[in-house]
Amino acid sequence: MRASDSNSEQITMELVRIQERIKQLKEKEDCYNQLRGKLPDLYVPDYNHALQQFCRSLPSKKRKIVKLYYGGKTLEEIGKTVGLSRERIRHIAPLILDDFPYAVIDRELRLYMKHLNSRKRRCKSAKKIEDILKEEKDAREKILNLPVRVMCLPTHAHYSLKQNNVNSIGEIIENNEKIFTFRHFGQGSYNKIKSKLKEYRLIDYFNSYNTRKIEEIIEKEGVDKAPIEALKLSQRPYNCLRRSRIFSVGDIIKNYSKLPYIRYLGPKSYDEIMSKLKKRQIKETK
């Protein structure tokens, strides 16, 4: 009797797990279809085709785990097949498809914008070029409304943006001048955003917005209030200053005597900062 009870409990637990996995896939499908709905004029494959494409792009072991996990196999069976523990499978299996909807949309957007650009270069008719430019502009406007996760940024960058209520690609551009002050958001994350926006053909929005904002700050409040990005420093001195909570040109001037003692800020980085200040005709106050 006890054996039959334990067997029925195991069967019930397996059914619950299978239902949870079906629910996870349903949530992925809803998320993907919602993103597709924001891009009605762009070609985006249907859910099943997109899922197959994504799975084909995975490493062989992860692809096998996905197939077994959503195919109704138990965690023990999957673990024995791929040579991992049951607990490890329990942790990683649901996360493999975590970025699925966003990664597919990201790839399709990059391919679409690249296709538009190549069409524009090959086209010789002024009327057709005008139509392509209009199509490109419409696509850009739609991309600006997409969530940040579509960009597939590093995890720490994504959570840094989320904590500061930057939830869409358009909001990244609007908050350009604030991004530098976000905690755990370094030059690497900033460069990743720039490369993604370049692929989406939005880099001109980003650069013009950033340059305009810096110029406005300098004109209205003076160069002391300008962010350190106005100096266009290389990565090492830039990161050293930010780690020391120095975010503006005025902060550099106030902390001038402390600059030589900042960790990892060597003589070359120090000289670079001084030369950039000199170009801006800023005198340090000792």
Image (spheres, helix red, strand yellow):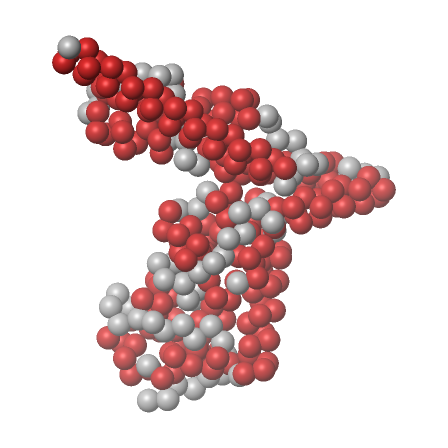
Q: How many marks?
A: 0
Residue lying farthest to the front in this orientation:
1
Whether residue 189 is visible to the viewer of this picture, yes or no, is: no
Image height check: is 119 above or below 260?
Answer: above
At x 59% / y 75%, what residue is drawn? 216
Q: Quadrant of residue 98?
A: top left
Image height check: is 193 above or below 132?
Answer: below
In-front residue for pair 44/244 = 44
From the viewer's perspective, is 50 left or right of 261?
right
At x 44% / y 46%, what residue is drawn? 153
Quarter of the picture holding the N terminus: top left
Measured as percent of width and height from the top left, residue 209 is found at 60, 63
Quarter of the picture holding the C terminus: bottom left
Image height check: is 101 above or below 276?
Answer: above
At x 24% / y 15%, what residue is drawn? 8
Residue lying farthest to the bottom in this orientation:
286
From the viewer's perspective, is 133 left or right of 181?
right
In-front residue for pair 24/164 = 24
At x 63% / y 41%, what residue is drawn? 38
Measured as percent of width and height from the top left, residue 121 is found at 72, 40
Measured as percent of width and height from the top left, residue 151 is found at 50, 44
